[in-house]
Image: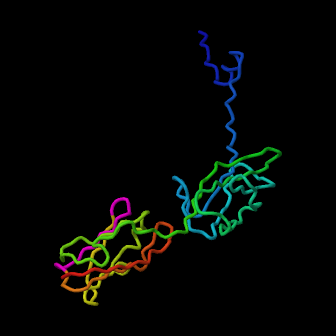
Amino acid sequence: MNLARPLSPLLAVLTAGCIVVPEVETAPREVNLVIQGDSGEGPVHTRGPDVSVSVGLQGVTPNLIELLVDGRSEARLEPPDAYTWDTRTLTEGAHELQLQAIDRGELLVSPSRTVVLDRTAPAIAQRKPAPGSSVARDSIIQAEFSEPLEPSTVNADTVRLWVNELGQQVQAELSSDGKVLTVRTRYGLPPSGPAQLQLNGVTDLVGNPVLSSWGWNYP
């Protein structure tokens, strides 16, 4: 009795008259811009003046890498060294950064990133109580700013309330958008007398300091 032996996988393919060759995945060839303080979400906000810029490479070894700022050549970069971008001569506001690289005769371009230069301290749009006013001791103490504050800089050391030249223990809170600061005394109502709120060490998100104080009176 003659039993047929099964064909091996390779012989089965040959017998079928074709060979299946798996596709070879080519490694991506990328040039990426790495900016100091970049979270990868939205624009990069900074007060400058110096911003560290470096290059991320994948599958390429370019012989030329150029940094463009607003479409103009800023510098040639040499990875792995970082480049210190001096922003002193640029205006405040948004600027577009991008890399161009030459690899094996091919031009590669990185995704662009927006950097927003902000050198201006937050302005106070509204104060409560109004400066120089006489108000009840349970009146709200609040300041509204033109831009968000950095939450880590709002604390009992940077927000101080004085009544009759005596420091009061307070609790400082920021609104969810970071623009409204509310101050409350920790233990009951403040005493009667002249009051003053001082902000010293509070900053916006990029470190521009808020230096402000105003006073009112508790009859």
Tell me where the magenta segment starts and ends, as one range.
175-189
User: Does residue 205 show up magenta in the picture?
Assistant: no
- Residue 74: image x %, image y %? 74, 60
Does 99 appear above or below 164? Answer: above
- Residue 183: image x %, image y %? 28, 73
In which quadrant is the N terminus drawn? top right
Q: Residue at coordinates 72% horizontally, 16% vertically from top-left?
A: 17
Q: Residue at coordinates 21% horizontally, 81% vertically from top-left?
A: 218
Residue farthest along the bottom direction in this orientation = 165
Report the colour scheme: rainbow
Q: Nearer the viewer, residue 194 or 100?
A: 194
**Image-based side of 160 in relation to 9, left or right:** left
Q: Nearer the viewer, residue 24 or 192?
A: 192
Residue 54, quarter of the rendered image: bottom right
Q: Residue at coordinates 33% horizontally, 70% vertically from top-left?
A: 127
In which quadrant is the C terminus drawn? bottom left
- Residue 35: image x %, image y %? 61, 60
**Prevailing secondary structure class for the magenta stretch in the rendered image:** loop
Residue farthest along the top direction in this orientation = 1
**Image-based side of 46 in relation to 182, left or right:** right
Does 165 appear above or below 24? Answer: below
